[in-house]
Image: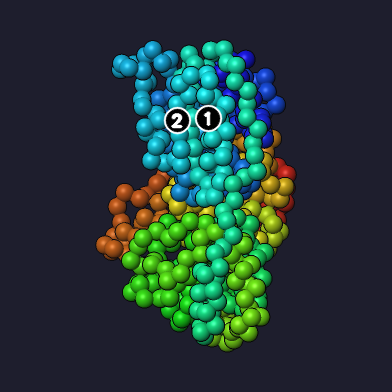
Amino acid sequence: MNTAEVLVAGLEREGVEHVFGLPGEENEATMFALRDSDITFVPVRHEQGAAFMADVYGRLTGDAGVCLSTLGPGATNLLTGVADANLDKAPLVAITGQGGLESLHVESHQRLDVVDMFDPVTKWNTQISNPGIVHESVRKAFKTAEFEKPGATHLELPEDVADEECEAEPMDPRQRVRRPEPDAPSVETVRELLADAERPIVIAGNGAVRTDASDDLRAFVESYDLPVTATYMGKGAVSDDDDHSLLTLDSGEHEEASDAIESADLVITVGYDIAEHDPADWNPAGETTVVHVDSEPAEVYENYDPDVEIVSDIASAVRELDACCDEIDAEFESDWYDDLRDHILADVTPDREEGDPFTVKQVLPVLRDVMADDDVLLSDVGSHKMAIAQNFVTYEPNTCIISNGLASMGISVPGGLSADLAVDSNVVSATGDGGFMMNAAEIETATRIGCGYTILLFRDDEYGLITEEQVEHRGEHFGTELKNPDFQTFAESFGIEAYRPDDWDELETALAEAVPSDEMSLVEVVLE
């Protein structure tokens, strides 16, 4: 075999089923190795779309999504999606081609130092500079991408090395690296804090979802009768149908969760990264007693300086704390947060009149009604993301996917494709007109490979979130207005069903038809 064939054989050993990418001259050997493998190569319309597909696939499955490009502009196009995966803690392996080693010491066509470029946005990356290291490089890329905390890795394969004969054998994957059990002294300290507390509260972050700690967290909050609020990426860790849920932590439209934290005398964060939500919003003075439960130590930050850190496997730590409940006879009364929950639920299910114009907030309950508990809503970035994060009630982990580390516009349409490949349930990609047009070409990719999911397109003819922020800051806005095509005709040109409801009855009918369908569809909602 040549080096490229050994690399692809390594992907097969890792259980890779799909590679998303674009062909190029410098990755030709890899392309033909993929052709002869059991892996499905998905040719996309833009490398950024390929990286977003791998990003969402990794986040939903826990197995590294794989994206592929050639050198130069192909690699630079991958960069945003790779960075998004890294900051959102989604496992991803990027593979790029490169010119021959003999040309890399001089300025040459499309020559960039891709390994150096990817260094700030990956956990690890390398050039496969000789055939003898390809097997180790593939194994390390997947091991590093997938162990907690997961993220992105990158392999560069120069075209001459790719064609060289290779005697290396692909390495078998091993049991994934796990964090240790929690240390007894830290658990004992938290036990004492819980015994002394009167109003403790839990913040569930991305890690609570990512590490499958949801069941243990639900048992923990039930045992102690604790309120819990989630970050955008922690939605569903505890069901919003649970009386303990205060839905989403936010400082925006409804601030009840922040009010609860202000009233609390102990905050226990579970799998929380400060990149998800600035602690200054809920701990402005830095004086709140905080317990940090995560797989890595807390970032050093004056508004997030935990009193105790349990650094271990997250689910194991939560189980240990739950086991302390009977020992300290702690069960906290819920009357101090019940009213806050009632206010939040009333806010996320607003009354509307039949003639009311469409708003994202009022559309969400209609969408929720036609989605099963385990259906997946994938949000793009924009003003609709804020409404989804704050108001879309979520019942299961990993069913409301929001990019909030890098917060990249354009993720929703390509991400919907890989979500449809990753899960058996229905998928809805919610997007604004700004984010939609960035990667709308991937509708063709989705239809070509037989995907079926619903694109829910909110159209306001502007970059609405930036308009809102400019108006708030300056009383006016500039540079945010857009002109759009006829989205219904645009969607139909790809051969998919398209709806543009004019009233609430038509919207309910459109969503009820589109969401459960196995076919691709687009529902355009015109906002006023």
Estimate the x, y position of residue 2 in percent, counting from the top left. 58, 15
Q: As drawn, is 8 to the left or to the right of 156? A: right
Could you tell me the amino acid type at mark 1?
Ser
Which of the image's four quarters has the N terminus?
top right
Q: In this figure, which colouring scheme has been used for the structure?
A: rainbow
Residue sitting at x 67%, y 19%: 36
Q: As drawn, is 33 to the left or to the right of 198? A: right
- Which residue is labeled 2 in the image? 126
- Which residue is labeled 1 in the image? 137
Is residue 273 placed above or below 455 in the rendered structure? below
Tag 2 or tag 1, which sits nearer the N-term?
2
Q: CA distance from mark 1 to mark 2?
A: 8 Å
The front one of 227 and 448 is 227
Decide if residue 358 is in sight here: no
Dot 1 and dot 2 residues touching (CB under 8 Å): yes
Residue sitting at x 62%, y 68%: 320
